[in-house]
Amino acid sequence: MKIRLNGQERLLEQIDSVADLIRSLELAPEQVAVELNNQLIARSQHAAVQLTEGDEVEIVTMVGGG
Amino acid sequence: MQSSNPETALKDKPLVIGDMRLNSRLLVGTGKYASMDEMKSALEISGTDCVTVAVRRVELDPKRGENILDHIDRDRYQILPNTAGCFDAKTAVRTARLARELIGTNLVKLEVLGDERTLLPDPIGTLEAARELVSDGFCVLVYTSDDPRLAVHLEQAGVAAVMPAGSPIGSGQGILNPNALRILMELVSVPVIVDAGVGTASDVAVAMELGAEGVLLNTGIAAAREPLRMAAAMRDGCTAGRQAFLAGRIPRKLYATASSPVEGVIEASNA
């Protein structure tokens, strides 16, 4: 399945949910927040929310800033 | 009325914004440091209780660097996420919601900027986003220009603090329009924190002497030749300015007033 992840095309294999995607990227779930098609997905919903072809996903974290 | 006890005479109350109680009135950004270690030391030396962070896309390469959240002691510092880099209200609101989800805080430093060259706040977008975030339960500290009337509108929108720029972000030009800031502080009753443009310790002192409740800065420390030494200078400038404000400066006068008694001076010799 092809999605857009942080503005880049990405081909996903054996990934169904948002939680699967976070795991495959080796990200710490408590250090990211996710939007799916411009909708915020609560951390508690990561396992339940399924990804589908053409989804736009944003995964963000905190960085240094003023 | 002042106490004659040296300890109690110097006491100050904490800065309260929403649920946040800050003993230090210096709020410090976490950007532009050479390393996480340097940032940590600078924060510690600055004495700050509240640090800002930004929300950005994660690096997708698993060999990504360290995460800043591993380097900020959340028992020690309040984390204030910003919406820096947002040029419209909608993106700023989305960013604030992502930040709230990310670290479970309803605090946000709202920035809606006009353009990349000036980084001046966009007044219309800022007000629009402030209204939206307040109605969504956020404790909004809003970055704005030093326009007093806009600050009044932001206060009416329900923000918890108004944060006028002393001068453009990262410019180090200091407090360009102290008169506008004085009027602004007269017109709003929520805390006013001077944010942006601070280049050196005396800029912090000037802002605090004007009556600002706090100062937020980042580049002034992080881009100094010696950031740790500048963190100490900013800390002291903040305390100095605050104490001077509380103490009440003497009025400016055109002519001299002797500080030694004018009586009892020996006679001038003609020899």
Image (cartoon, rainbow, N blue to C red):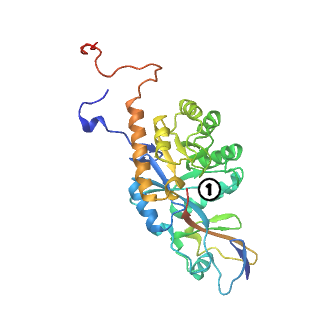
Task: Residue under label 1, please give it.
Answer: B84
Is B108 or A14 nearer to us in this picture? B108
* Residue B119 seen: yes
In the rendered image, residue B81, in percent from the top left (x then y), is placed at 54, 57
Q: Look at the numbered disc 1 and give the secondary structure of its residue.
A: loop
In the rendered image, residue B184, in percent from the top left (x then y), is placed at 57, 33
Outermost bottom residue = A14
Q: Name the image quarter holding residue A52.
A: bottom right
On screen, B184 above or below B65?
Answer: above
Q: Residue at x 54, y 33 (%)?
A: B185
Q: Residue at x 48, y 56 (%)?
A: B51
On screen, B183 above or below B75?
Answer: above
Dot 1 crowding, Cα within 10 Å, few <14, some 14–19, many 20+: many
Outermost front residue = B271
- Which amino acid, mark 1? Ala
In the rendered image, residue A42, in percent from the top left (x then y), is placed at 58, 66
Q: Could you tell me which chain the residue with mark 1 belongs to?
A: B
Left or right: residue B26 versus residue A66 is left
